[in-house]
Amino acid sequence: MLLIIEGSEFELKMIYRLSPIFYKPSKKQQVIATFYLEQVFFIIMKMTLIFTIYTLFAVNQQSIENTMLLDASIMKTDNRWRIVNDAVMGGLSSSKATVKDDIIIFSGNVSLENNGGFASLRSPVKEYNFEKFSGIEIKVKGDGKRYSISMKETTYFSGYFYTSTFETKKDEWITIKIPFDQFKLHYFGKETKSNKKIPLNNIKEISLLIGDKQEGSFKVEIEYLQIF
């Protein structure tokens, strides 16, 4: 509201600037107002577009990160996988995992002494949910031996694992895709007769393992292991 004093008689005029009933802007004022409104609208639309693009990019990046379970960069973080050998059962097998030129090298020696016979590289124990995915994909260069990928649904050792085995080709890079329905329930390394399906919404640990009485040295190079 604007108060204006006019003339010698101090005529008071009350002009309600915000009301179209009492105040009609000139054409020039209308043009200026329209211009500024258009500028404000343009800025809002630009900011909305930028926010949308950023959100889509962030979601896509998160999706990529969520599918990758193991690669060289993960091995340099707190989420790196760890070595677990048959020493937990009194065995004498040994292994190590190193990173060179963005490739993970898992190598060691499998011993059958003291009822041992396996070496493994295992993920952190935490909650994994694979319900929206179809299987495990791994790119490796092996030594011609058999390896397996296993998953378990407990945070403690029970002897039960859902396992699928694959063959490697000596000194040759190969990409292997294993659908989840090919994982069978094993107990202490032996396949059971159970038809129980893998609980994809309740996985606690994933492991890459060599066993099957393959005594001697081994070496497998891993570029990545992910879900698809």
Image: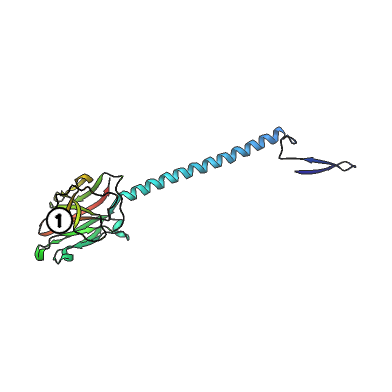
Secondary structure beneath disc 1? loop
Residue at x 48%, y 45% (from the top left corner)? 51
221 versus 39 height, above or below:
below
Count of numbered badges drawn on the protein: 1
Q: Nearer the viewer, residue 56 or 152?
A: 152
Q: Which residue is mark 1?
A: 189
**Residue lying furthest top:** 27
**Residue 40 in the image: x percent, y percent?**
59, 41
| Residue at 9% across, 62% down | 112
Specify whether residue 179 is in view: no
Say which quadrant the N terminus sits in. top right
Q: Residue at position x 24%, y 51% from top?
A: 223
Q: Quadrant of residue 76?
A: bottom left
Q: Mark 1, residues whose alpha carbon is within 10 Å: few (<14), some, or many (≥20)?
A: some
Task: Residue 137: give x, y in percent of width and height.
Answer: 24, 47
**Image position, residue 82 (x, y; %):** 25, 61
| Quarter of the view holding residue 12 | top right
User: Is 131 left or right of 84, judged from the image as shown?
Assistant: right
Quarter in which the C terminus is drawn = top left
Q: What's the residue type where badge 1 is placed?
A: Gly
| Viewer can see residue 186 | yes
